[in-house]
Structures are given as C-alpha cells and as structure tokens.
Image (cartoon, helix red, strand yellow):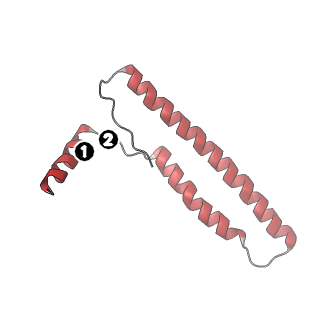
Amino acid sequence: MTTQTPPTTGGRDDLRTMAIEQLRKKRGLQGHIITYVSVNLLLVSIWYFTGQHFFWPVFFLFGWGIGLAFNIWDVYMPERMTEERIEQEMQRLSRGR
C-alpha cells in the first residue's frame, strides 16, 4: 500500500500529480473488479455444470476477495500525510532513542 505525501510547494503541478496517481489507482481497481467477477463467474459455472456437491469456488471467491478488499481500501481510504502527523511521528521516534 502506498501513501500519498502532501504537496510541499502547494503548487498546481503537485495536485495534478496526485490526481493522476489516484485516477490510475481507480482504473487499476476497475480492472481488478472486472477480472475478479469474470474469473469467478467462470469457476462457478464450471462447478455448476460438473454437478459437484461441494462448492469449491468458495476458496477462490474468499481468498481473492480479501485481496480485492485491500485494493479497494488502498484506493478509497488512502492514509493522508499531514504536517501534523509527520511532526507527531518525528517526536515519537526521537523519544525512542
């Protein structure tokens, strides 16, 4: 998971860079969701047409779903760094020396 740093100069270029990064993450998430749904539909179809009693696709749905959940978290709940948080962490680290 990546964290975003605040723009240091407050310039429009920094905001543009952050916006482009966020849009790329959203596009990547869309691809991840489409792949997840497509592959799992295929696996469930195979399970259904083979007449198996045990629903084995649950392992793929659950396992891959965890990764998808983390991807969603990374895109929509990024940890924002603020100067206040940076100062707090610096103070915490200096006390530990």
Residue shown at the point (43%, 47%) measured from the top left: 77
For label 2, the SS is: loop
Packing grade of label 2 (10 A; few <14, some 14-19, many >=20) is few
- The spot of residue 37 in percent (x, y) is 70, 54
What's the amino acid at mark 1? Arg
Location of residue 41 (image quadrant): bottom right
Residue shown at the point (53%, 51%) measured from the top left: 71
- The spot of residue 29 in percent (x, y) is 58, 45
Q: Nearer the viewer, residue 62 or 13?
A: 13
How many numbered discs? 2
Residue shown at the point (39%, 39%) measured from the top left: 4
The quadrant of the picture occupied by the C terminus is bottom left
- Image mark for residue 81: 2
What's the amino acid at mark 2? Met
Q: Are marks 2 and 1 in contact (CB under 8 Å)?
A: yes
Location of residue 53 (image quadrant): bottom right
Left or right of 23? Residue 13 is: left
For label 1, the SS is: helix
Location of residue 26 (image quadrant): top right
Residue shown at the point (73%, 74%) measured from the top left: 55
- Residue at the bottom extreme of this rendering: 53
- Image mark for residue 85: 1
- The spot of residue 79 in percent (x, y) is 37, 46
Packing grade of label 1 (10 A; few <14, some 14-19, many >=20) is few
- Image mark for residue 46: none
Alpha-carbon distance for marks 2 and 1? 6 Å
- Residue at the front extreme of this rendering: 97
Left or right of 75? Residue 84 is: left
- The spot of residue 36 in percent (x, y) is 67, 54
